[in-house]
Image (cartoon, grey):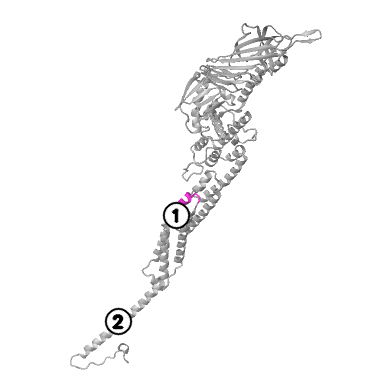
Amino acid sequence: METNKSALCLSGADPCGRHQRLTRRLRRSIAMLLVFATVTGASMVIGAPRAAAAEGLNIASDYVYRLTDDGVLTVEATYTLTNETPNSRRGFTITSFYYDAFGVPLPELYDNLTVTDGDRALTHEIVADEDAGEVFEIVVADFRRRLNYRQTTTIVVTYDVVGSAPRSDLPDRLNPAYAFFAAWGYADDGQLNVTIELPRTYDVQNLGSYMSTETGSEVITLTATDIADPFDFSALIVARNDDALTESPVETGDVELVVRGWPGDDEWQKFATSTIGDGIPILEALIGSEWPEDDDFVVIQSVEPNFHGYAGWYDVELGQIVVDEWLDTRVMLHELSHAWFNGETFEDRWIIEGFAEEFSRQASIEAGDDPPAAHPPSSLEPKRLNEWTNLDRGDATELWGYTGAGWVMQELFDDVGAGAFGDLVVAIDEGAPTFGDEDGAGESELPPDWRRLLDVAERQFGSEVADGLFRDWVVTEAQAEILDERSTAFARVDELAEAGGEWFVPVGVRESAEEWDFEPISELVDSALDVLVLRDELDDRSVAHGLVSHAIGERDYEAATDDFGAVVGALSVRLNAVGTVEATTERYDAFEPTFLQEVGLWGEDYDAEYAEVREAYDADDSSLVAGESVEMAMLLADSEALGRFRVTLAALASAAVLLLLTMMVVWVVRRRRKRARRTVGGEPVPKVAVPTAFLGTG
């Protein structure tokens, strides 16, 4: 299968079952047609081609298959038969071997049979040959005369191949828009030529034995000559003429697309249009996003996918879905789901098919069907789903892959919940981060692969079974070791998130976890936890002293990638500041001023000075804290000396006042004495005793 056909579908409880039955039937039909060619003679019946040559009848044949524009396939088989069995002699008896008839196998459905010798019709009859449990018809043509030793005759058999009706057991189909048939021939080794002629109106593909191709102005001719082993030769021809398909438009909401089916198969056309019209709105609601394809999108009927092993496929490049003829709602919805789930939206095949399986199952339920639930594969084969790719073919592998993918997605659906499963898909599609910032913003760096699905299911939608499912069914042994690293790393991230509280996990830690770069996470988390220790210490010491606890360094912490130096520096400065406040508080609380200190603090409000230290801390001004603390410390330290100075100064001032008063008294006394000597009558003024201390005499 081409890689662009990334959405390959088999659905149902046994998703590969129908294809396996069709494939076996096709192979068996072709093999039987080749094996049951019969040659008859007067005295013997010769079976398979190789036996014919051994018995002495040489068979050379030319087969021409002609397909018309109307889808009519005519076969003209020309046999040249030569008797190579010599007479035998035994004593006086001569035995002569001759042939008088020849048997030609016919397809299961045919019409307009003619048998001639090239000029005139031959007598013939249809007989049944019962081998391998099934009945095939053989036309036995009578020769006009006995075919003796070394004689040659010709038989020409023509007939129209009648294609099987849609949805019949046999896989061949013939109509103006689509033809699938097997071209084969019956002859001895090296004596078979097969020619296939098809109109240019068909797009032709040969899925079987090699044939050279020549394209003319009106006819495409495929040729194989001198085929070495006719028994193994079979060309499987697929011829499509899409212009002859019957078109039916489908409109549902804003969605417009076209259904193109085989002419005459009205039942499929009606089924397809109704299923698509009802199914797309259901899928849109379940998945949570609108139909993603353009209006020129086409759904085409074909059995071609069956021969690649599928019930249908979604072709990304051509913008079309090719679905087989069976009226299977689940298959149609599965293929429609691939408009959302394909190689351009997801990387892993099992995710693409698993989503398509589960959403088509849910949509079938919504549409009124009762599809079977998924079941786990019987074994791991011993593969894991991450090893299942488009290059990994085989019926058993495909059955295992589809079954396993559907089982895992069903388990996730049941665990996450119907309402959230579509949101999970949208989150992956939009690249929503698993470890976003505190507002949930960001964008995932992982591609949309199994790692992204696991992260989103587990981390964003709370799945409790995702890790176990992935370990049991999805990852290889080496990838399981990565899951162990993931578990350890994510546990450390959760530890940091819990320890951080309102401080969000640093961007460097989140990005490493988001990208599954687990190696640096442990060291980053340890460094971040060291920062939180400083933060908590700062908070505790601030609260203990009734101070405002600012989110110092929070932005630097959350923005850190691999270096927490800036936030450590900021917290260290703040811790120094709180230490200063603590020391200042200790001095303030322990200060019991003496008389001299009280005198020294006259005119100063050391309570206000202490308050200014705290206010500077609350204002997150560490330099001011230091300045105010130093100023207060100096004030308290200098208060006693200043008080002593003030007391001494006061004492000196008091002595000066007393001296001044004494001098004033002396002055007053002397002045009075002088006045006394100048009294009226000139009488002498009696002496007044003056204290010697004032007069300075003995």
Viewer-side residue, 154 vs 471: 154
Viewer-side residue, 70 vs 222: 222
- Badge 2: residue crowd in 10 Å (few <14, some 14–19, many ≥20): few
Q: Disc 1 to disc 2, how far (Cα)?
A: 63 Å
Looking at the image, residue 428 lies above or below residue 360: below
Local secondary structure at mark 1: loop
How many marks do you count on the picture? 2
Residue at x 57% of width, y 39% of height: 466
Q: Hey, what amino acid is under mark 1?
A: His
Labels 1, 2: front one? 1
Tell me the residue that label 2 is attached to: 660
Local secondary structure at mark 2: helix
Coordinates of residue 507 in the picture (x, y in percent): 49, 47
- Badge 1: residue crowd in 10 Å (few <14, some 14–19, many ≥20): some
Q: Hey, what amino acid is under mark 2?
A: Leu
Residue at x 53% of width, y 45% of height: 513
Tell me the residue that label 1 is attached to: 550
Looking at the image, residue 582 lies above or below residue 268: below
- 512 on left or right of 601: right
Viewer-side residue, 151 vs 460: 151
Is residue 561 inside the magenta stretch?
yes
- 426 on left or right of 155: left
Report the span colored magenta: 555-562
Q: Looking at the image, can residue 346 be seen?
A: yes
Q: Looking at the image, can residue 502 be seen?
A: no
